[in-house]
Image (cartoon, rainbow, N blue to C red):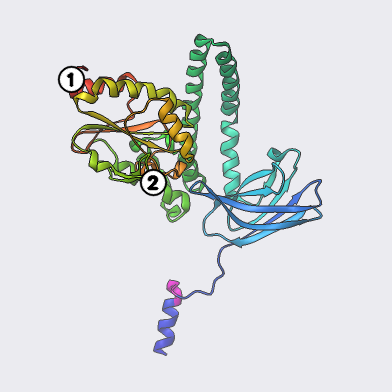
């Protein structure tokens, strides 16, 4: 009798459970195509992960599986450009895909996807305006019309601000939906620590344990570790000769840790400013460590030569998975941190004249 009572108590606590896992099903139709193959995939750490595949039979396909929290998956039709994002959750989801117009996909049965669609509808007018501005900017750029380019730059920035404000309002109004942390983590490059902390607090803690909520918390912790006044996290990566170089070995000078890549046009445009600062102040105790988010070694080395970057350069050639960049919470480049002689972070993301002004403040007038 005693054992039965204990077992009943444990079952009530959920310590023993025979309940099935949270299940999802996706029932799909691809119109106008009878046969072929379709994949169910997701993105993780910048890499594609194949979850399942199915054969089309009379244009029909189906997937099923278990899922704990709603998550963005993708349906990808083999040998085509059909690429359909959808939010999968524990429910019965129906999808109708028109290969001639994949944007007109019909998705029903996912409450999370419905919330995302509401946000997409809100920002669509802003996105359309931004697309129009970008097209005008390219025309002005081709014509060398710097006045028009400056005006369009300003208009584009205003649209970005409106879009960000719309997103923040939407997240706070839908704080119990998985779309809230999803939107923030997808646009995390737009947020510095104070804003990110405020938004994170507003999101329902019932989402704790979900991929997007956990990434958001991780992002907050990373940014806290690289704020001004914090010791710079140490790392080691190989230099251009393949020899390991450790950040802390460069202490003793004011050091700019500069995150860039050969494929990054804004980085290449900023490089002459860094070269100028290095030439003016290196004799007074200033140094630079370039950290490249390249993946092609030859293109990385060619850019170093072309841009006359004569200081130490390191990379693990892992693109956006560069471990040093992840350690510093780098989500866009160019980006940098300035360290004092003891390896303490004293400034972040200095550009152009801002960098030389700070070096003049720290080291005195340039020679």
> Residue 12 colored magenta?
yes
> Residue 143 colored magenta?
no
Left of 238 or right of it: where is 172? right
* Position above or below: 114 against 284: below
**Residues under labels 1 and 2: Cα distance?**
34 Å
Left of 210 or right of it: where is 252? left
Left of 156 or right of it: where is 259? left
Residue, x 51% and y 21% (percent of image)? Answer: 156
**Quadrant including the N terminus:** bottom left
In front: 310, or 86?
310
- Reading the image, the residue beneath label 2 is 323
In front: 43, or 299?
299
Find residue 278 and report its image quarter: top left
Q: Residue furthest front?
A: 241
Magenta stretch prevailing secondary structure: helix
Q: Give the x, y percent position of residue 257.
A: 31, 34
Find residue 281 and report its image quarter: top left
Left of 119 or right of it: where is 318? left
**Quadrant including the C terminus:** top left
> In this orientation, does residue 94 appear?
yes
- Reading the image, the residue beneath label 1 is 364
Specify start and end residues of the magenta stretch as a single range.
Answer: 11-15
Residue, x 47% and y 37% (percent of image)? Answer: 298
Q: Element under label 1?
A: loop
Q: Give the x, y percent position of residue 11.
A: 46, 76
Q: Give the x, y percent position of residue 160.
A: 49, 27
């Amino acid at each position: 009798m005693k054992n039965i009572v204990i077992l009943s108590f444990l079952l009530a606590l959920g310590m023993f459970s025979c309940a099935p896992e949270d299940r999802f099903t996706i029932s799909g139709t691809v119109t106008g195509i009878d046969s072929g193959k379709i994949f169910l995939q997701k993105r993780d750490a910048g890499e594609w992960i194949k979850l399942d595949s199915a054969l089309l039979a009379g244009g029909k396909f189906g997937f099923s599986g278990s899922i704990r929290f709603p998550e963005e998956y993708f349906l990808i039709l083999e040998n085509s450009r059909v690429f359909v994002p959808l939010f999968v959750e524990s429910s019965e989801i129906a999808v109708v895909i028109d290969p001639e117009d994949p944007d007109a996909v019909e998705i029903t049965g996912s409450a999370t996807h419905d919330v995302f669609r509401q946000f997409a509808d809100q920002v669509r007018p802003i996105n359309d305006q931004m697309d129009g501005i970008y097209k005008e900017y390219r025309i002005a750029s081709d014509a060398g019309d710097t006045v028009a380019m400056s005006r369009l730059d300003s208009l584009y920035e205003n649209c970005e601000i409106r879009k960000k404000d719309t997103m923040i309002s939407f997240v706070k109004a839908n704080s119990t939906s998985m779309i809230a942390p999803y939107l923030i983590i997808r646009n995390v490059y737009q947020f510095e620590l104070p804003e990110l902390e405020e938004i994170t607090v507003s999101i329902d803690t019932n989402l704790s344990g979900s991929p997007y909520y956990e990434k958001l918390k991780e992002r907050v912790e990373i940014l806290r570790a690289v704020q001004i006044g914090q010791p710079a996290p140490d790392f080691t990566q190989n230099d251009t000769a393949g020899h390991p170089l450790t950040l802390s070995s460069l202490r003793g000078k004011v050091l700019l840790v500069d995150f860039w890549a050969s494929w990054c046009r804004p980085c290449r445009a900023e490089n002459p400013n860094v070269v100028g600062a290095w030439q003016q102040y290196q004799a007074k105790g200033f140094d630079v460590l370039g950290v490249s988010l390249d993946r092609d070694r030859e293109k990385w080395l060619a850019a170093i030569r072309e841009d006359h970057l004569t200081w130490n350069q390191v990379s693990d050639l892992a693109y956006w998975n560069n471990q040093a960049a992840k350690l510093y919470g780098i989500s866009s480049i160019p980006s940098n941190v300035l360290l004092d002689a003891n390896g303490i972070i004293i400034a972040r993301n200095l550009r152009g004249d801002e960098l030389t002004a700070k070096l003049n403040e720290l080291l005195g007038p340039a020679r």
